[in-house]
């Protein structure tokens, strides 16, 4: 994985250990190995354009207040789950580092317009053939 352009600093991240869900035998009831990572986007040291793009994401992990909440519970090790949560947060930040290309409006070509009209008329003919036959003539 390449080095991130805007690395997330660990002093801005808040961790809390919780009990993992799911099967795990007796161990799952005794040990708090899952991790909740909380990262406040507005209070972070990220550049403003990246903060705006992160807050504009339609992601269920981002709350109304702009806090990213990631739950990691794949490993039985607390440290491994922390590293997994940090990697997922960094991947989320990296996904918005490159601004989207602005869309330039283009007109359809004459050939594509004719092709569309031809297929429309073909479908129309197919549907006309489905009608009931009447002896009006």
Image (cartoon, helix red, strand yellow):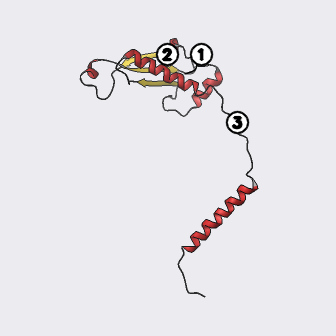
Residue 44: x percent and y percent?
57, 17
Q: Residue at x 28, y 25 (%)?
A: 24
Look at mark 2 in the image and give the residue it sits on. Answer: 13
The N terminus - image quarter: top right
Circle 2 packing at 10 Å, graded few (<14), some (14-19), many (20+), is some
Calculate the distance from the C-alpha at mark 3 to the C-alpha at mark 2: 33 Å
Query: Are the two marked residues, 3 and 1, in contact with CB atoms closer than 8 angstroms?
Result: no
Query: Disc 3 or 1, which lies upstream in sequence?
Result: 1
Count all numbered tags in the image, as a single digit. 3
Q: In the image shown, does 3 or 79 lie closer to the viewer? A: 3
* Residue 82 image-quadrant placement: top left
Q: In the image shown, does 124 or 10 lie closer to the viewer? A: 124
Q: Residue at x 58, y 28 (%)?
A: 95
Residue 25: x percent and y percent?
25, 25
Circle 3 packing at 10 Å, graded few (<14), some (14-19), many (20+), is few
Query: Disc 1 or 2, which lies upstream in sequence?
Result: 2
Query: Are the two marked residues, 1 and 2, in contact with CB atoms closer than 8 angstroms?
Result: no
Look at mark 3 in the image and give the residue it sits on. Answer: 102
Report the disc number at residue 45.
1
Helix, strand or loop at label 1? It is loop
* Residue 35 image-quadrant placement: top left
Report the disc number at residue 103.
none
Residue 136: x percent and y percent?
58, 87
Calculate the distance from the C-alpha at mark 1 to the C-alpha at mark 2: 11 Å
Q: Residue at x 54, y 26 (%)?
A: 92
Helix, strand or loop at label 3? It is loop
* Residue 17 image-quadrant placement: top left
Please identify the residue farthest to the front as the structure is shown.
1
Q: Residue at x 36, y 17 (%)?
A: 77
Calculate the distance from the C-alpha at mark 3 to the C-alpha at mark 1: 26 Å
């Amino acid at each position: 994985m390449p080095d991130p352009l805007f690395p997330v600093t660990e002093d801005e991240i808040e961790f809390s250990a919780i009990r993992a869900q799911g099967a795990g035998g007796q161990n799952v009831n005794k040990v708090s190995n899952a991790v909740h990572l909380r990262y406040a986007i507005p209070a972070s040291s990220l550049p403003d354009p990246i903060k705006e793009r992160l807050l504009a994401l339609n992601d269920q992990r981002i709350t109304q207040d702009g806090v990213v909440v990631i739950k990691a519970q794949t490993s039985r090790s607390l440290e491994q789950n922390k590293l997994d949560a940090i990697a997922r947060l960094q991947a989320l930040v990296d996904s918005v580092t490159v601004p989207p290309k602005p869309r330039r409006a283009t007109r359809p070509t004459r050939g594509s317009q004719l092709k569309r009209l031809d297929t429309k008329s073909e479908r129309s003919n197919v549907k006309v053939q489905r009608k009931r036959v009447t002896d009006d003539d």
